[in-house]
Image (cartoon, helix red, strand yellow):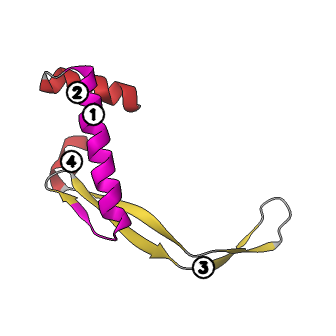
């Protein structure tokens, strides 16, 4: 499912227009992004939680040449599915 299909699904399920559904989805993405940027966790009960974790610097290998390369430390977004979501997928 891509963003346009998700907007269509939101519009159909919530009986909203596609324009309103797009605004709602964009607002959700903006709010989650801003919260994660501050280093805070976003928990949606039953759906899951988003968090930021730090990945330390490490040494990797260039698959083409086999040469060792340094991979810089960075922050990554993690998602842990909630129990209700996990149960619906099974």
Q: Which residue sits furthest right?
A: 65
From the image, tell me which residue sits under label 1.
Answer: 23
What quarter of the picture does the C terminus occupy? top left
Q: What separation in Å lies between label 2 and label 4 (alpha carbons)?
A: 25 Å
Whether label 1 touches label 4, CB < 8 Å: no
Q: Is residue 68 above or below residue 82?
A: below
Q: What separation in Å lies between label 2 and label 1 (alpha carbons)?
A: 5 Å
Q: Nearer the viewer, residue 41 or 58?
A: 41
| Count of numbered marks | 4
Magenta highlight on residue 84: no
* Relative to 53, 6 lies left or right: left
Q: Secondary structure at mark 4?
A: helix
Q: Which mark is residue 57?
A: 3
Q: Residues within 10 Å of mark 4 (few under 14, many from 20)?
A: few
Residue 45 x %, y %: 13, 55
* Relative to 56, 60 lies left or right: right
Q: What separation in Å lies between label 2 and label 3 (alpha carbons)?
A: 42 Å
Which residue occupies 38% across, 68% down? 52
Whether label 4 touches label 3, CB < 8 Å: no
Q: Which mark is residue 85?
A: 4
From the image, tell me which residue sits under label 2.
Answer: 20
Majority secondary structure of magenta residues: helix
Q: Is residue 18 above or below residue 82?
A: above
Comparing labels 4 and 3, the label whose residue is closer to the camera: 3
Span highlighted in magenta in the image: 17-42
């Amino acid at each position: 499912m891509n963003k346009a299909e998700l907007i269509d699904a939101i519009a159909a399920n919530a009986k909203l227009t596609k324009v309103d559904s797009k605004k709602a989805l964009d607002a959700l993405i903006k709010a989650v992004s801003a919260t994660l940027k501050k280093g805070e966790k976003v928990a949606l009960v039953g759906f899951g939680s988003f968090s930021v974790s730090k990945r330390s610097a490490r040494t990797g290998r260039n698959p083409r040449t086999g040469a060792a390369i340094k991979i810089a430390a960075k922050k990554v977004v993690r998602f842990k599915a909630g129990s209700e979501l996990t149960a619906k997928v099974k």
